[in-house]
Every structure is written in C-alpha cells, then in structure tokens.
DNA sequence: AGCACGCCGACT
DNA sequence: GTCGGCGTGCTC
C-alpha cells in the first residue's frame, strides 16, 4: 500500500510535523495533495481531520502505520504553494505550521460544496514566469473623482494578468480599502472574476470563494491580511496597498505581517510583487535603498500645500480659508490626532496634570464626557486631590473641536468621523468634516480644503515609527484633496516643513530609516520580543538566550517582555534557537496553565520601542 | 487536544 | 492490600 503524509491544522507544538498513514486501495483514487482525510489518531475514539501533504511508496516511520479511514470530499482544499508558504512563514516567525493552516483554510461548508462546479479550463498557459519584477509604486497624489487613485492603478496592473488567465492576489489593510477596491472592480466590470477572502463573510460564501481560489485560474483574489495565505491557482502577480498600516500585522501568534509573508510568497512562487502607498513604510524604503525593489513614481502633479509654524490649530489665515471654502458650498476636512474631549487634563488651581491612582496614566475626557484613565479605563469624579473643581484641557479632541467649530461656522454642517464612529462618504457641499487618521470620509471630487491640524502632536509620540506613521496618515488624508484644493499642515518647522510642503515622503522616511540603521534599529535589523506572565520563566529564558551571540538585548519598560535585536541574515538560526529555548523553558516550567501558552514569541515586534 | 501510563495517599 | 489523584508524554 502507498503512504500519505498528513498534517493537522492545530496550534499544538507537539503536532507540528507530518504523520504517515497507509492508503487503502479503495481510497487511492481520491487521495491527492491537499484533500482532507479522516484518520485515527492517538487513543482517541473519534477520527481526526487532517490534510494530505505528500504521497509516497514508503515511510520513514519505524512504528506500526495505520490506515486512512475516509476521504469526506475529493476536493483539494490546500494548494502546494500554500503549504510551502505556511512552512516558510512558520520557520521565519518561530511559529507552528498548523496554526497558520488553521487560519488559511476556512470551515468546510457542505452546502457550498454541493453547488461547486470547477469550470473546465483549457490547458494553462505555460509562458513561464519570465521577467519577475518587484516594485514600490506611488500612485497619483490625488484620488479621482469617484475612485481612489491606488485602486485605479491596481486595476490597470491586474488586467493583463487576468487576460493571460493568471490569478492576481490583492492584500489590503482594512474594510475601507476593500470598499475602495470593490468600487474600482465594479466600475471596470471585474466583480465577476473577483473572489473576496474574508473571515467576516458567511461560512457558505467563504468556502465557495476558497474553493474557487484553489481550483480556478485567472481570478482576482483579494481581502485583508489573512488573504496573504489564500490559495491562488496560477498566481501571476501580488499587489499590496499601504503595507505600513498597522492592520497588516497579525495580532496573534506567530505575529506575521502581510509585507514579509508576501515577499516570501513572491520568492517561493517566483511572481512579481508591487507594494503601493502614498508614503512608504521604512521597510519598503530600505528595500528600495538596497535595490531589491525598484521605485516607480506615478504621483504626478502635486497639490498646493501650505505649512504653518505655530501650534495653533487654526490660525487666522487657515480660519479664513475654511470659512471661504464653506461659503463656496465646498467640503472641508480637518484631520486631528485623537478622540475624546481632551488628551490630558490640568487642574486650574494646582496646575497638576491629572493621573490615574492605579497606573499613573494621564486622565482624559472620554467621548461621554467622563473623566477616565486612558490606560485602565477607571472613571474619576470631578474633583482634584487639591480640592480644585476646574480642569483645563491641554489639547482638544474631535468632539470638543466639533462643538467649537459648530459655533464658529454656524451655517455649515459639522460632521465627526472616527475609527469607532466612521462615516465613509459625504455629499459634495459646504460641509466641515473632522476626522481622526484613517477615518477620513471620501467625497466626490475631493475636499477643497484639508487641514492637518495635529501634525506636530503626531510627530511627538514616543515611538520608533512615529515619523513614518505620521507621514502615512498625512499622505493618505491629502489624497482626498480636490485638484483645485489647498492643504494646510499645522505646526511643522525646518527641513521637515519644506519636505512636507513638497510631499517628499519618500525622502523623509528614507532619512529616518538611515538614522535608525546607524543605531542598529529596525528595519536594518529585526526586533524580537518574548512576552510571558511569569517572571521566573522569563529569567530562565533570559539566561538561556544570553549564550546566543546573534542576539543583542535591548531594555524594555515592563518586566514581562524580553527584547532583542538581531541581523536579518541571522533570521533563520535565531528563529530556531529561540523556538528551542522557549520549548525547553515551557517543558520544565511549573507555571503551566491548561490550554494556555506560557511564552509568546514575536520575531518582528512593532511596539516595544 | 485526548488519552494512557505511572507512581503516591485514603479507603472498603 | 486496591482505587484514584492528575503530572508526563505520545499519538503515524
């Protein structure tokens, strides 16, 4: 009898390998790579579902081989390329193949399967994958009247691939981008060939789209970050929008991100890849710098941008610009940094900044006008320690500004759009929109005036990536400007002011990236963090890791996290060593909790510094 | 995950 | 003497 290698879509490290089973002759016809099988496993009575990832005449296993019990459906659910990608990502991130497979394969829907018919296709074009290109592409600075410039650009790039019956994979940061992309697909009559891979779709749709992506070539497969692992038959091109956006990072182990996964996919499947954004991430900037990516600039005509130096949100000139634009019945956008009524509260009698008694975090006025700790959410009354009853806001949030502007421009409608209360589109008229970064509503033809009111504050965050993230948020907001519009960026000085005025985000991020390189910080190096709850376990891990020369430890603010930098070239050996050390500590620890992981390895931490 | 194997305390 | 606690380790 022939032998099949089977893997399980399980996050358990003990099951992170292939198990061999004999193929009974009556099932031999149905067994092929990527089909689901029912197999006996362990001493459990009920059969376990696995996936066939290899068929051979023999097995290296010395024990007694068992037989596959059943093949519930002859349909392939996993492609060879997907499996290789999961293996590569697991090894790079010191994670487990099974946990990646679990998210790459949706839940089976028998109802979807009953209706699924593979379109019989001609023999695939085999014109090879000659001329693989890897690019960073800047789309036009300004969006079209009805469509996002990047989405239109994506359509142009994917068209020729679809015509060749190549599939195209499109990975987007969030649902707003999905909306923009779907609008572009619709406008170009491509919706029929596009298959969304989304965890929020219903089980039947999800499974249907998954099956199409496995079995049919020449499709547009798109979705948010999870789609990076989606099957794509005859893949010819990978497109990623705004790779620097936080949403491209997976929040659970093994903490992969779209950029790195898709770079690996491009290498493994030898296909072209295009990263696109208005302002590059520092990683993309580095890849352009070392010549791995070529830089294609389609940004075109620059809009008119004014930079003011003062810290005042709306100086006289800006105020009259807003006022004049509204009078002309044209829309205005004001981008501010955060929610709530105030970012910090100062007592008017003792001048103390109000802090939480538990965690020392600054208090703020939340959207419900309750004084609350920003960190632990504890609510406070309206009384300072000194007995003072009055507070002054050190910086205003969106709701306070809405109220103030409603008074200043009584005849205009004032709308607020934030991450949690988002408006996606507004009518083209004299309307004043206040939005937090990433929540800017679209408007046909663009805004006639855009004010980036908190530019200075957004730079001030004590984070490694503050500058590149600020550039990303500004550039994305400015894409909403009308061709005849004017933008005002508040509170920048010196070289940075000049660079922002010229929309030289490429250069700003490049300089920032080079400065970080000199300090040995990402993206020139990688940053590893290991987080746990138990300090003794972390201590013993620290001792184990101290013998590894490739790692250089960096301090962290909490005792619950160890952080190290390591060189990109050492990536695979570091991943191996760390995985080993963590499994040893886990094995000998006395603090194990059932079903809970003791230590979390993040091979590319974004937030410890 | 399940489940068996295994070596120490209170029970008919 | 045995029943059963769940720590440890394996499952093709």
Image (cartoon, coloured by chain):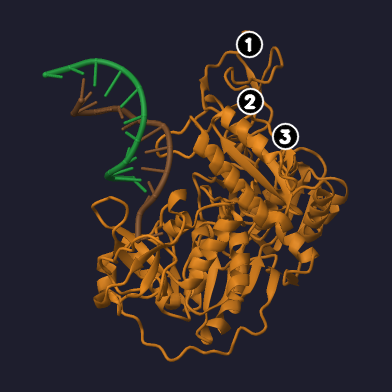
Chain colours: A orange, B green, C brown
Q: Position of residue A117 (x, y in %)?
A: 31, 79
Q: Earlier in the sequence, mark 1 or mark 2?
A: 2
Q: Nearer the viewer, residue A70 or A547?
A: A547
Q: Is residue A376 visible?
A: yes
The residue drawn where x is 40% and y is 39% is A595
Q: Which residue is mark 2?
A: A362
| Mark 3 surroundings: few (<14), some (14-19) or many (≥20) residues within 10 A | few
Q: Chain of mark 1?
A: A
Discs 1 and 2 lie in a common subunit: yes
Q: Is residue A374 visible?
A: no
Q: Position of residue A422 (x, y in %)?
A: 50, 49
- Residue A173 versus residue A609 in the image, above or below: below
Q: Which one is in front in this view, the residue at disc 3 or the one at disc 2?
A: 3
The label on residue A388 is 1
Q: Position of residue C11 (x, y in %)?
A: 35, 54
Q: Chain of mark 3?
A: A
Q: Nearer the viewer, residue A486 or A6?
A: A6
Q: Nearer the viewer, residue A298 or A451?
A: A298
Q: Chain of mark 2?
A: A
SS at mark 2?
loop
| Mark 1 surroundings: few (<14), some (14-19) or many (≥20) residues within 10 A | some
Res A267 → quadrant: bottom right
Between the residue at mark 3 and the residue at mark 2, the CA separation in whole angstroms equals 23 Å
Q: Which residue is mark 3?
A: A555
Q: Nearer the viewer, residue A259 or A573?
A: A573
């Amino acid at each position: 009898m022939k032998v099949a290698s089977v893997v399980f879509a399980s996050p358990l490290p003990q099951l992170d390998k292939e198990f061999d089973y004999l193929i009974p002759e009556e099932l031999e016809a149905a067994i092929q790579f990527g089909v689901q099988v029912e197999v006996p496993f362990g001493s459990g009575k009920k059969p376990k579902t696995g996936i066939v990832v290899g068929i051979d005449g023999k097995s290296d296993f010395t024990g007694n081989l068992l037989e596959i019990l059943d093949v519930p459906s002859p349909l392939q659910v996993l492609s060879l390329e997907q499996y290789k990608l999961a293996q590569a990502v697991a090894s790079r991130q010191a994670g487990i193949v099974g946990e990646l497979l679990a998210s790459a394969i949706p839940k089976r829907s028998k109802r979807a399967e009953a209706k699924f018919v593979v379109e019989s296709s001609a023999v695939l074009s085999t014109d090879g994958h000659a001329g693989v290109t890897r690019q960073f592409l800047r789309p036009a600075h300004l969006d079209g009247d009805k469509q996002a410039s990047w989405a239109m650009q994506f359509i142009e790039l994917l068209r020729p691939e679809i015509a060749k019956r190549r599939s195209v994979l499109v990975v987007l940061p969030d649902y707003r981008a999905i909306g923009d992309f779907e609008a572009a697909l619709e406008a170009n009559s491509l919706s029929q060939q596009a298959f969304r891979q989304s965890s929020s779709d219903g089980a039947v749709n999800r499974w249907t789209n998954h099956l199409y992506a496995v079995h049919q070539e020449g499709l547009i497969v798109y979705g948010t970050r999870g789609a990076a692992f989606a099957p794509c038959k005859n893949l010819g091109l990978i497109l990623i929008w705004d790779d620097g956006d936080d949403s491209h990072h997976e929040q659970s182990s093994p903490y992969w991100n779209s950029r790195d996964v898709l770079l690996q996919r491009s290498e493994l499947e030898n296909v072209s890849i295009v990263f696109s954004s208005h302002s590059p991430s520092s990683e993309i900037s580095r890849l352009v710098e070392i010549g791995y990516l070529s830089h294609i600039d389609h940004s075109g005509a620059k809009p008119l941008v004014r930079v003011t130096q003062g810290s005042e949100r709306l100086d006289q000139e800006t105020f009259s610009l807003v006022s004049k634009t509204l009078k002309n019945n044209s829309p205005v956008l004001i981008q501010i940094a955060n929610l709530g009524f105030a970012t910090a509260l100062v007592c008017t009698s003792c001048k103390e900044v109000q802090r939480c008694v538990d965690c020392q975090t600054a208090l703020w006025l939340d959207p419900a006008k309750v004084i609350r700790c920003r960190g632990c959410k504890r609510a406070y009354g309206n009384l300072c320690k000194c007995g003072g009853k009055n507070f002054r806001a050190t910086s205003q949030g969106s709701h306070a500004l809405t109220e103030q502007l409603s008074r200043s421009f009584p005849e205009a409608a004032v709308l607020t759009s934030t991450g949690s209360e988002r408006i996606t589109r507004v009518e083209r008229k004299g309307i004043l929109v206040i939005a937090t970064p990433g929540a800017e509503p679209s408007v046909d033809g663009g805004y006639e005036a855009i004010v980036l009111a908190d530019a200075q504050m957004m730079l001030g965050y004590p984070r490694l990536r503050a500058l590149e993230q600020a550039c990303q948020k500004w550039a994305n907001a400015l894409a909403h400007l009308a061709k005849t519009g004017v933008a005002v960026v508040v509170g920048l000085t010196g070289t940075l002011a000049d660079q922002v005025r010229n929309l030289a985000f490429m250069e700003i991020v490049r300089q920032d990236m080079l400065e970080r390189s000199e300090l040995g910080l990402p993206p020139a190096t990688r940053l590893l963090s290991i987080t746990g709850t138990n300090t003794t376990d972390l201590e013993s891990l620290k001792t184990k890791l101290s013998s590894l020369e490739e790692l250089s430890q960096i301090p962290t603010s909490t005792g619950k996290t160890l952080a190290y930098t390591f060189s990109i070239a050492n990536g695979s050996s570091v991943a191996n060593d760390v995985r080993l050390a963590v499994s040893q500590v886990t094995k000998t620890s006395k603090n194990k909790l059932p079903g809970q992981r003791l230590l979390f390895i993040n091979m590319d931490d974004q937030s410890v510094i």
